[in-house]
Amino acid sequence: MFGSPCRLNLQLVCTPKTLARDTLDVWPALPVLILGNVYSSGMDDIIVALGQTNHICQVHLWGLKDRQLDKVLAAMQVPFLQLTGLRQCFQNRTDTREMTKQI
């Protein structure tokens, strides 16, 4: 089944509640979709998941505060070869903005 993951379009979904440190290492090299509302969640597992740069296919995060956005952007300063979609919605006290990029 895992011999051709692209053929089945299998993806691992990583959310702010996914224990990425424990989970991502036990799966085969499947594409990873990072998805979730991080407004009230910690960012540690999202940052760990972003470390899988060769497997990240899409990132869809919303509810990012300024500090969280800074952490995500710092983790994304390397090439993501499989990335096909990026959507980050962030808010601060004065406005709400959305950054969307389809690759």
Image (tube, rainbow, N blue to C red):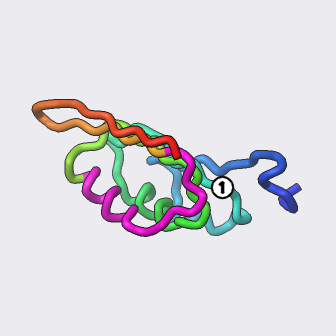
Q: Position of residue 6 (x, y in %)?
A: 78, 53
Q: Badge 1 is on which residue? A: 31
Q: Nearer the viewer, residue 17 or 98?
A: 98
Q: Is residue 90 left or right of residue 5?
A: left
The relative height of residue 26 versus residue 90 in the rendered view (above or below) is below
- Quadrant in the rendering for residue 101: top left
Q: What is the secondary structure assignment of the residue under circle 1?
A: loop
Q: How many marks?
A: 1
**Residue 87 vertical position relative to residue 56 in the rendered view, above or below:** above
Amino acid under label 1? Pro
Q: Residues within 10 Å of mark 1 (few under 14, many from 20)?
A: many
Residue at figure coordinates x 50%, y 41% from the top left? 102
Measuring 85% from the left and 58% from the top, which residue is drawn there?
4
- Name the spot of residue 35 as percent of width and height, x first: 50, 42
Q: Say which of 52 and 22 sits in front.
A: 52
Q: Is residue 81 left or right of residue 76?
A: right
Which quadrant of the structure image shows residue 26? bottom right
The residue at the far front in this view is 103
Q: Is residue 87 left or right of residue 56?
A: left
